[in-house]
Amino acid sequence: MTRLQLVHLAHARSGDKGDTANIGVIAYEPGHYDLLRRLLTAERVKAHLAELVRGKVERFELPRVWALNFLLHGALGGGGTLSLRTDSQGKVLSTALLRMELDVPDDVANAVRGRGRVPAGWSPSIR
Amino acid sequence: MTRSRTVRVAAGQGFWGDELEAPVRQVEGGPIDYLVLDYLAEVTMSILRKQRSKDPAAGYALDFVSLMERIFPACVSRGIGVVSNAGGVNPEGCAEALVEAGRRAGAAGKATVALVTGDDLMDRLEPLIGDGHELRHMESGRPLADVLDRVQSANVYLGAAPIVDALAGGASVVLTGRAVDAALTYAPLVHELGWSFDDYDRLAAGVVAGHLNECGAQSTGGNCSAEWWTIHGLADVGFPIVEAEADGTFVVTKHPGTGGVVNRATVTEQLVYEIGDPSAYMGPDVVADFTTVEIDDLGDDRVRVRGATGRPPPERLKVSVAYSAGWKSAGTLTYTWPDAAAKARAASRVLLERLDRLGLSFAETHVELVGWDSTHGSLAGAPPADIPEVQLRVAVRADERAPVERFTREIAPLVLTGPPSVTGYATGRPRVDEIVAFWPALIDREAVEPHVKVEMLHV
């Protein structure tokens, strides 16, 4: 097993619904969806985001599009407009989840090495 | 009647404040049948209500009227229908301005504006509560009467039916107040493709299409976390266009030659954006199941979406009430190496102690180091000792304005009276903002639907 961050296996988008935030996590490869489903349990996500999410975490599955949707209750300091945080609407909570570390089989880790992060030497002028 | 044709519905705005040239590119960049313009985020209605309290003629998205003046001739000559919720809390005023704009643009006698009203409950709240509609908060269960004196706006989310009626009546522009965002997109599909309001699978397909349109470029490469550095041309990003067939299958695409990209990743990220239980996406016309949706990347910026399924909608409609819930402010200062984070944290302690000594009472105070932990919290770990700089951001919230006002005067003094090597205070005292909070509630359809009207105005 190799420890690596979720960012190499999935992309994600987050947003708000009242004081609840959601994070949609999408596997880059369909073959990794089941792995993510096993590793990204609601309990583990709650533990990872414990400081940012006061309430419970619910998980929903969208297997046909290789995605998991997490509902984070009490994640926005009282709701978008009441929150004092910079990220009052949870728009970047997705990235807090993408840094989560997972233990994955070595062959998976080797296959996704470097994926999900800007390549070394990249600059905005490179096309 | 089901027609065998493709209907192209183009998204022009994802929110009020979105890229102003996008709807022009949608009209000029290739063939479309409808342009839909979404201006209303949750917070927008209360902002518009405040504007109207100062000026009775205001209260709608002014950008929409100036935009329409530019594109009216092209829309009329090419038969492009426009559907927008730009009416805000003054759809009548918006419609009047729109008719005048149409005349100035040379569309007199060539266009009809349909005005949809009945979503605005503000003037009906007391009688509604008197009749037993308690409008209880969907999470806390409290009745709206608890905050009635602080309510700033109250609107029910209308569905597609009045928009479809307007299109059937020959409207070239349909203007609403609060309608569900997705309805702006699926109402034209219902009208053009002859869908029935009890054909829940097709309505669900329409909801998915609307969901993929309603945040503009978030479906076409904007804000996409999947290898974002490979997405080019965002300076003239193409906004999404839904090409729908009678069976509910549709392709998400964008005009040729525009920037951004439409692929599986961009579409899937938007599919899961701001949803709850994906098997029960609630709306006034249908409960859509997103878990049966299949996404096929056809290449060349074309992604096919199919398979959505639907169930009958809930008995009651959603109401969004905005009410005043206190005051807040945030102040910032920048601290530099050496020991930037330690200095910033020490400064925040000095500030909070001063606020305490002043006897000020806050519902909440919040300290962040921007550049280190403001978005990931403790997941960021301890800042490195040699971090070059951090921005200290302290925010407070209170029921009364006065303590928040005093807080704003306590930031700058830290420059001469706190830890060293601090800058970034030249912008003056931070702003005090009124907090407008949301009160989601449900209301019986019978209390709303008889009040919904469609009025046709000739340009």
Image (cartoon, coloured by chain):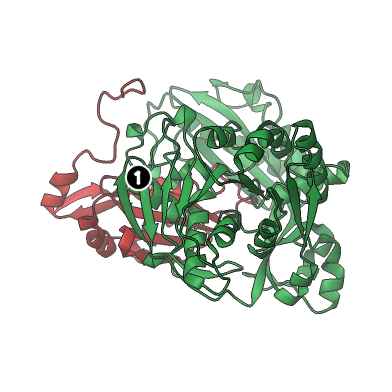
Mark 1 falls on what kind of element?
Answer: loop
Q: Where is residue B89 in the image (x, y as percent from the top left)?
A: 78, 51
Indicate whether B171 appears above or below A113: below
The quadrant of the rendering that contains the C terminus of chain B is top right
Chain bearing mark 1:
B
Q: Where is residue A15 in the image (x, y as percent from the top left)?
A: 50, 51
Residue at 59 percent of width and 60 percent of height? B191
Q: Can residue B360 be seen in this view?
A: no
The quadrant of the rendering that contains the N terminus of chain B is bottom right
Q: Is residue B82 visible?
A: yes
Which residue appears farthest toward the left when viewing the image?
A: A107
Report whether B358 appears left or right of B371. Answer: right
Nearer to the camera, B56 or B300: B300
* Quarter residue B184 falls in: bottom right
Report whether B284 appears left or right of B386. Answer: right
Report whether A21 appears left or right of B221. Answer: right
Q: Which amino acid does label 1 sit on?
A: Asn
Colour chosen for chain A: red
Nearer to the camera, B369 or B120: B120
* Residue position for label 1: B263
